[in-house]
Image (spheres, helix red, strand yellow):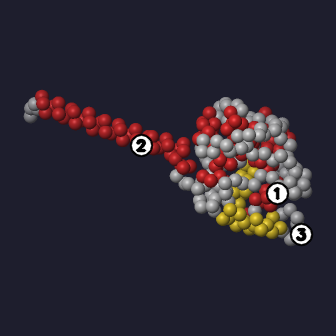
Amino acid sequence: MTVSWSAYRRARRRSRQAWALLATCAAAVLAAVFWFFTAGQFAAAGPAPDAPTEAPVFDPAWMKPVAQPHAVPAGPALSALDGLAVKGRAAGTGYDREEYGQAWLDVDRNGCDTRNDILRRDLVDVVFAEGSRCKVAAGHFREPYTGRDVVFQRGSESSRAVQIDHVVALGDAWQKGAQGLSARDRQSLANDPLNLIAVDGPANQQKSSADAATWLPKSAAVRCHYVARQISVKAAYGLWVTEAEKDAMKRVLSSCPDQPTIRTR
């Protein structure tokens, strides 16, 4: 079978057009995937109606400030972000939760352990265990990361529904400067009310040790406060950010450039 020159040229032209179409589709798919894993997964959720725009920080009526190695600068969180060092992650070698001291110490010496301090601060209609002025047995709140109403009931299984999140995860902190902190300062970082929020248990598990480049709260309403709080913690303890983390924080704060840093005093 012979093929004319004109037919051959038409076939080649159709082939080039088909390959060009495939290349365009592939580029669009790659762009969509990139968007989803940078900003899209966070933007898609949107804020829940009446979702919290911030989380409690400090109640001087019964909490005492935790010693921080550095003062959190007043002013816009964006300015404080520019003051943080930008470096790559250090090796995670040697990380162990015990490097931050015993979990939930009474670092501020107010007579109650940190976990119960945070539950008391963040929940409403708090009920204490019988005979205790510290041990929180029940309460409820509008949870900031999901914007949902969540009930806390102390129990071997039910307590998991509400967990205490380290805003700057301890694993992340370890790779961004905490290895160089003193044992006392690491204890403070792990128990500082500035770095702790009562949250939905599954959301906390999903976050794990992620930074702002890879995880943000599902509820968009609280993201400005959340990112400002991370920046404030890192400023207080001399921790750094990665380039990707800084870019993600700037994207969030671009919608709220006047968002201030978060301070406990």
Tag 2–tag 3 contact (CB < 8 Å): no
Tag 1–tag 3 contact (CB < 8 Å): no
- Under circle 3, the secondary element is loop
Q: Which residue is mark 3?
A: 131
Q: Picture coordinates of residue 149 (x, y %)?
A: 66, 65
In the figure, is residue 248 to the left or right of 8? right
Residue 93, image quadrant: top right
**Label 1 packing within 10 angstroms: few (<14), some (14-19), many (20+):** many
Of the residues under marks 1 and 2, which one precedes in the sequence?
A: 2
Looking at this view, is 178 or 241 the one in front?
Answer: 241
- Give the residue type that dot 3 points to: Gly
Q: Which residue is mark 2?
A: 29
Distance from Cα at disc 1 to Cα at disc 3: 17 Å
- Give the residue type that dot 2 points to: Val
Q: In this orientation, does residue 156 appear?
A: no
Name the residue located 67 percent from the left edge and 57 percent from the top edge.
Answer: 52
Distance from Cα at disc 2 to Cα at disc 3: 60 Å
Q: Which residue is mark 1?
A: 117
Name the residue located 69 percent from the left edge and 36 percent from the top edge.
Answer: 79
Q: Picture coordinates of residue 237 (x, y %)?
A: 78, 38
